[in-house]
Amino acid sequence: MTVIDRLSAFRTQAGVLIFAMLVGAITMGAFSRYWQFFLAQYAVAALAALGVNITVGMAGVLSLASPVFMAVGAYGTVLLMTVLDVPFIVAAPVSVMASSLLGWLIGLISARIKGLQFAIITLGFLLVSQSVLVSGGDLTGGTYGLVTPPTTLPFVGEMTDRMIGFIAVATLVLVAVGCHFFANSRTGRAMVGMKSQETATELTGVYVARLKALAMAACGGVTAIAGVLYALVLGTTQPDSYGIGLALFHLTIVVVAGMSANVTSVLVSSAILYIVPEFFLWLGPYRELFYASLMLAVLIMAPRGLLEFDAHLRGLLLRNPKIGDR
């Protein structure tokens, strides 16, 4: 095995190991209460970005519907628990499956539409969903939203803040590993091929329309998981939380990551754009300017996102045959 192969394997293993360590740290209380809450929020953002990366990074389908799927996961879970008295362990999977089905339907309806036209359609779904949430009256809580009821798990009892943080980060680890294997599966490779050469992929016998619908369904499911956790972490869910700004944030993470099937780059990109600015709170009103400058600096130095740095590292290794053949 060459150093290049070892680097590839190490990158994946390192990403999983880092997040596994975070799970252990949260469990042991190594972080303060604030950082447990903050890392749980990061896990939600990274989960949503992983879902968007399936459509944008792998399948090449530009979608702005991630807030819609998150809203279905969050509102669906809370409504099932409060209105129908369904336990959380049942309400959450039902909401995730409903969001995945919605993604499948959006993909089927818009199967023959490409590029910006598809993005506009998903933007329309986003605007409609926000209108429904705001005008839903007592059912959706209107502009004030809904409060997440106390959540219990079998054999565990009521979930504490630390337990919610642990579940959020643990879920991120499991979903990240699942996305990695999915990206390297036959279906994942077909999606990557469809992104670069859609006509050639269709000529190989792959039903591209169905593949797009599958990508939207997978995105809907993963992003809805983020929505469920979002409602748990914040303890409330409001329509303003699922607007166009959230969709653009998720898309920015994927763009900085390099818009590829690489899962680790999405996790690192999420950390750069979500965690790093937290260390610069002392900048006060100039914090947003720093955030924008950081994002622009990454894109200017590496137009292909974080994959550019990976390519530079591989190039250095390839220039030294003695290192590459070890």
Image: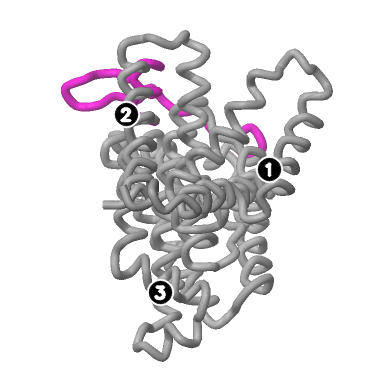
Quarter location, residue 82:
top left
The answer to whether mark 3 and mark 2 are in CB contact below 8 A is: no
In the image, which is nearer the foreground, mark 1 or mark 2?
1
Q: Can residue 145 be seen in the rendering of this structure?
A: no
Amino acid under label 3?
Leu
Query: From where the camera sits, is residue 38 visible?
Result: yes
Q: Which residue is mark 3?
A: 211
Q: CA distance from mark 3 to mark 2?
A: 32 Å
With 142 as the anchor, is 192 left or right in this view? left
In magenta stretch: residue 7: no
Q: Position of residue 305 (x, y in %)?
A: 61, 50
* Residue behind mark 2: 20
Q: Which residue is mark 1?
A: 298
Specify whether 60 is left or right of 100. Answer: right
Between the C-alphas of marks 1 and 2, the distance is 27 Å
At x 51%, y 29%, the residue is 41
Q: Identify the magenta region.
A: 142-168
Q: Residue at x 45, y 80 (%)?
A: 209
Disc count in the image? 3
User: Type of residue at label 1?
Assistant: Val
Looking at marks 1 and 2 on the same chain, the residue that comes earlier in the sequence is marked by: 2
**Label 2 is placed on what type of residue?**
Ala
